[in-house]
Image: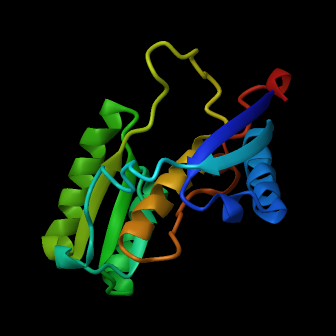
Amino acid sequence: RVFRLEIPVRCPDVWNRADVRACLSETLGFLSDDHWQFEFRQADAEGPTQGVFNFGPDSGFHPSRVVMFSGGLDSFAGAVEDLVEREEDIVLVSHGSATKLAKVQRELIGALRSMVGKERLRHVTLTAQLGQRARKEGTQRSRSFLFAALGMAVAEMFGLDRITFFENGVVSLNLPPVAQVI
């Protein structure tokens, strides 16, 4: 498949650099086995820069790390390591795509808070889905990229420049389920 995206941004000169577009195309191509083309244009000056949540410096919470949190064993173990072993304050970021997982995530976060106190971590759940009229995307081949992008958005809100992704190797890349998909 080939995707061509036109995206409004605040600094199109940065995003339209050949090396930036090549990095995006290569990363998404590796994760999804699709071909990606990007074109960036100037965003409307009046549009909101961040309208989902406010984690500015006045929030009182200053994490040292943003951890991607699926609710699986890998991300839970990583959160325990950061909270208990490293004694870091963290933000757990989840993608709210499945209601079954939300209950598991809440239970695990409750367990973490009972171990270290609720002031040491925050949990942010973000949802990004296709619109109702959009065609269904059954492969979820770019799921890892979406998850990481959500994490980076949260990291940016806290003034951090990296995220931690505890996942179990090749499974986190969302490899094709059957040979015919390749």
Name the spot of residue 72 as percent of width and height, x first.
43, 50
Residue pictured at 66% horizontal, 57% vertical: 169
* Res 144 visible: no
Q: Quadrant of the N terminus?
A: top right
Front position in the image: 166 or 60: 60
Name the spot of residue 164 as percent of width and height, x first.
51, 69
Residue pictured at 52% horizontal, 63% vertical: 166
Q: Quadrant of the C terminus?
A: top right
Furthest toward the bottom, the residue is 86
Residue pictured at 75% horizontal, 54% vertical: 27
Tell me: 71 left or right of 114. Answer: right
Q: Identify whether 49 is placed above or below 129.
A: below
Residue pictured at 54% horizontal, 58% vertical: 10
* Res 82 visible: yes
Name the spot of residue 123 as percent of width and height, x first.
27, 59
The quarter of the picture where residue 177 lies is top right
Name the spot of residue 66 as percent of width and height, x first.
41, 69
Tell me: 73 left or right of 173. Answer: left
Tell me: 74 left or right of 119. Answer: right
